[in-house]
Amino acid sequence: MIIVLKPSTAPEQLLAFTEKLKNDYGVRINRWDGVHSTVLGLIGDTTQVDIEYIEAQDIVESVKRVQEPYKKANRKFHPENTAVKISDTVTIGDGSLHIMAGPCSVESEEQIVGIAKSVQQSGATLLRGGAFKPRTSPYAFQGLKSAGLDLLKTARKETGLPIVTEIMRVSHIDMFENVDVIQVGARNMQNFELLKELGKTDKPILLKRGLSATIEEWLMSAEYIMAGGNDKVMLCERGIRTYETFTRNTLDISAIPVIKRLSHLPVIVDPSHAAGKSWLVEPLAMAAVAAGADGLIIEVHNDPPHALSDGAQSLTPQQFDGVASKLLSLKKALTQ
């Protein structure tokens, strides 16, 4: 249930009203202070709440019931967009466009530092790279693990770019203490024990959509993190599995405006994993920006034919430079 209060509500009136709601109905209350009004979100069993009584209060502007099972991620509870601060220079969801770029897997210091410097010059504001790699085949390269994390930190020291990398299990959380953005991969979107533990951290989380997840399931996974106390969640659309076999996945462009309508959380798009083909990255990325994405995560490798993972979908630094220039120009045109 959502209660919108009148702008003239005094602090003492608000306190008395919220305490009465808690005592009479046993609900928890999320409060959002907007520019023109205050919104109260009632969480719990609201079936016994007397709407007519609430509407009769002088300080109440309107009341409505919420049917969606996700509350904290729901735009109805939080009308304005959430902006997730990553560093002093990077805030995602504030209307700007941010590009996360880097290799699928960290392979060596020379590789990751070289790519980091290159993508930064092209306009990327975050460095992505996999230290732990979930692979379909147990025989494929699984990443450098903790050594890969150290190399990412080296690249961050060299460039100042915040780092984004994927976590695989709960026991690894302490290892990610100095990671700027923790990525939850598509296969872990419904690893609820991991999501609960990430909810106890104060780290920005990039939550990728599962291969066959509905938008509501995706938002419910975000809810797990937010229910634990961490509201620094960004949603990443990376394509879903359909009957089409030409591309690796099918990028759901419609998910961007749908999420923007249903939720206040920032939306990032991963055209690399959606396409599985490097030549498709540019048009899909352009479409994502046009549809309202807050950012992109793009795979870039210095030598794609010899990459240890996902070379076919990786751009070279030179290709990325051209793509990034077009994306930033498009964003500028859209905001003028």
Image: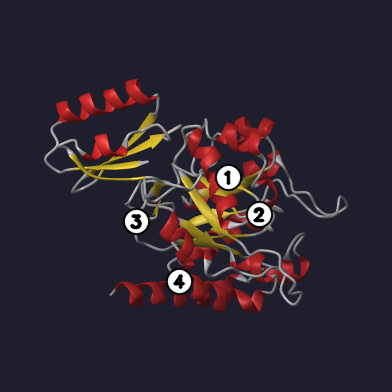
Q: Is residue 182 visible?
A: no
Q: Are marks 2 and 1 in contact (CB under 8 Å)?
A: yes
301 relative to 243 in the view: left or right: left
**Which class describes the residues within 10 Å of circle 4: few (<14), some (14-19), or many (20+)?**
some
Name the secondary structure under disc 2: loop
Q: Tell me the residue at 40%/24% (across/down).
A: 26
Q: Which mark is residue 221?
A: 1
**Of marks 3 and 1, which one's residue comes earlier in the chain?**
3
Q: Tell me the residue at 41%/60% (across/down).
A: 261
Q: Which residue type does callout 3 highlight?
A: Asp
Up-down: is 289 above or below 8?
Answer: below
Residue annotated with mark 3: 94
Q: Return the x and y of residue 218 as percentages of the image width and height.
A: 58, 51
Name the secondary structure under disc 4: helix
74 relative to 248 in the view: left or right: left
Q: Tell me the residue at 44%/51% (across/down).
A: 265
Residue annotated with mark 2: 210
Marks 3 and 4, how far apart at CA: 16 Å
Q: Return the x and y of residue 157 as percentages of the image width and height.
A: 51, 46
Q: Which residue type does callout 1 highlight?
A: Ser
